[in-house]
Amino acid sequence: MAQITNKPENKFQLIAVSSLRSKQLIDGAKPKIETTAKKWTTIAREEVRRGLVKFIVMNKKGGGQSPD
């Protein structure tokens, strides 16, 4: 089951989503915040922390085992 959210639950999600967002910024997406930061990674991380970037969290059930 998938869940759409805008707040990371842990540091791993923060870094993973920030990485994807920084790639979007590098490819020409406009920043969602006003900032003096010059690094795309810094801008992306702040956008994710503020909850401005939506992402999908895939939930696994069954302990990671594949169905037969």
Image: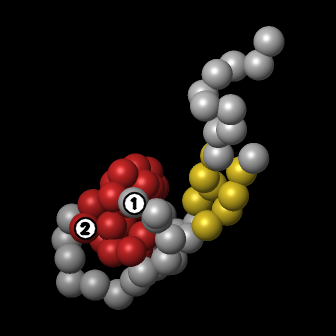
Q: Residue at x 67, y 62 (%)?
A: 4
In the image, taking residue 36 as reference, residue 54 lies left or right, namely right
Q: Report how far apart the C-alphas of labels 1 and 2 lie in the structure.
A: 18 Å
Q: Which residue is mark 1?
A: 10
Q: Describe the element under mark 2 as helix, strand or loop.
A: helix
* Residue type, mark 2 in image: Thr
- Residue 51, position as x, y percentages in the image: 49, 77
Q: Nearer the viewer, residue 23 or 13?
A: 13
Quadrant in the rendering for residue 65? top right
Q: Dot 2, how many residues are within 10 Å of its Cα: few (below 14), some (14-19), or many (20+)?
A: some
Quadrant in the rendering for residue 6? bottom right
Q: Describe the element under mark 1 as helix, strand or loop.
A: loop
Q: Nearer the viewer, residue 65 or 25?
A: 65
Q: Dot 1, how many residues are within 10 Å of its Cα: few (below 14), some (14-19), or many (20+)?
A: few
- Residue 10, position as x, y percentages in the image: 39, 60
- In the rendered view, tell whether residue 36 sits above or below residue 14: below
Q: Residue at x 58, y 59 (%)?
A: 55
- In the rendered view, tell whether residue 61 sits above or below residue 33: above
Q: Which residue is mark 2?
A: 42
Q: Residue furthest front?
A: 63
* Residue type, mark 1 in image: Asn
- Residue 20, position as x, y percentages in the image: 44, 51
